[in-house]
Amino acid sequence: MNELQSAKAPWGVAMQIGSVKQYFQVYQKVLGCLPYAAIEEAKEALLRGYEQDQSIFLFGNGGSAALASHFACDLGKGAVVNGNGQKRFRVLALTDNVALMTAWANDTCYERVFAEQLHNFVAPGDVALAISGSGNSPNVLCALEVAREAGAVNIGLTGFRGGDMKHLCDICIIIPSENMQIIEDLHLSVTHAIFSVIRQRLSDNVQVNALHGVASR
């Protein structure tokens, strides 16, 4: 079975990509099988967190760490459609404080770099958004355990079959692929889709409030 045939079943074996065109053909097949209901649930959970003034924490390793920082920027800055008094997302990427991460890694272990940061901040009703292509990164799982114990809403963004992450999440978005690059591509697409819908919702609210003379808070 070649890579395009196996892509018909998105959970198929890890696929060998022999050309650029094949990569995007496989990408397209996985795109058609995304868990759209879970993505919508995650979007609504983030909006509830925003509306209820809860904090949102994002974390992951490697490319997922970069995405955590990227998505925090989108929500924290990109979602500001009217800077004049608009309420903003209380969002923090736990990947951004290198000094703190290395301190915890050095004095405890790398598995605790996100969990220990959460202990300082997380409260009931907050949102913990974990990103892991495999769903099995130990430091991500430790942080999800801390968030769950604190009463946070756990959202997972993963691939393959969800790994151990899916058992620790209230909402788990599993990209149905075993190709890590396609998983990471679609993780970015998922966060951009969520952000785009959230920004439009907030923009609509600002316009409605402006018509009625209500402050955007």
Image (cartoon, helix red, strand yellow):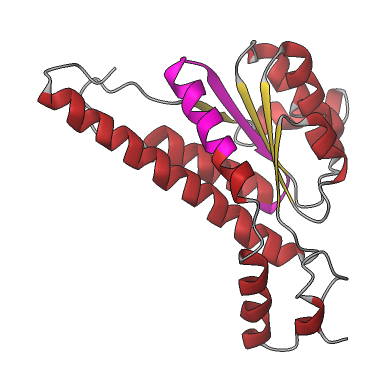
Q: Using the image, determine if residue 18 lies above or below residue 199.
A: below
- Is residue 203 shown left or right of residue 171? left
- Is residue 63 shown left or right of residue 106? left
Residue 145 point in image, percent of width and height: 81, 23
Q: Using the image, determine if residue 51 lies above or below residue 170.
A: above
Dividing the picture into quadrants, the one containing residue 137 is: top right
Is 90 inside the magenta-drawn segment? no
Q: Quadrant of the N terminus?
A: bottom right
Residue depicted at 88% across the width and 71% down the height: 13
Residue 99 seen in the current view:
yes
Question: Is 95 or 59 nearer to us in this picture?
Answer: 59
Residue 81 seen in the current view:
no
Residue 66 point in image, percent of width and height: 61, 48
Residue depicted at 83% across the width and 52% down the height: 161
Residue depicted at 64% across the width and 57% down the height: 34
Q: Using the image, determine if residue 147 lies above or below residue 163.
A: above
- Is residue 202 shown left or right of residue 106? left
Question: Which portion, as a residue range, is magenta?
Answer: 41-63
- Is residue 204 shown left or right of residue 132? left
Q: Quadrant of the C terminus?
A: top left
Dividing the picture into quadrants, the one containing residue 57 is: top right
Question: Is 53 or 115 nearer to us in this picture?
Answer: 53
Question: Is 206 or 120 nearer to us in this picture?
Answer: 206
Residue depicted at 45% across the width and 36% down the height: 75
Question: Is 191 or 92 nearer to us in this picture?
Answer: 191
Residue 3 point in image, percent of width and height: 80, 82
Q: Using the image, determine if residue 186 lies above or below residue 208.
A: below
Q: Residue furthest front?
A: 37
Residue 198 point in image, percent of width and height: 41, 38
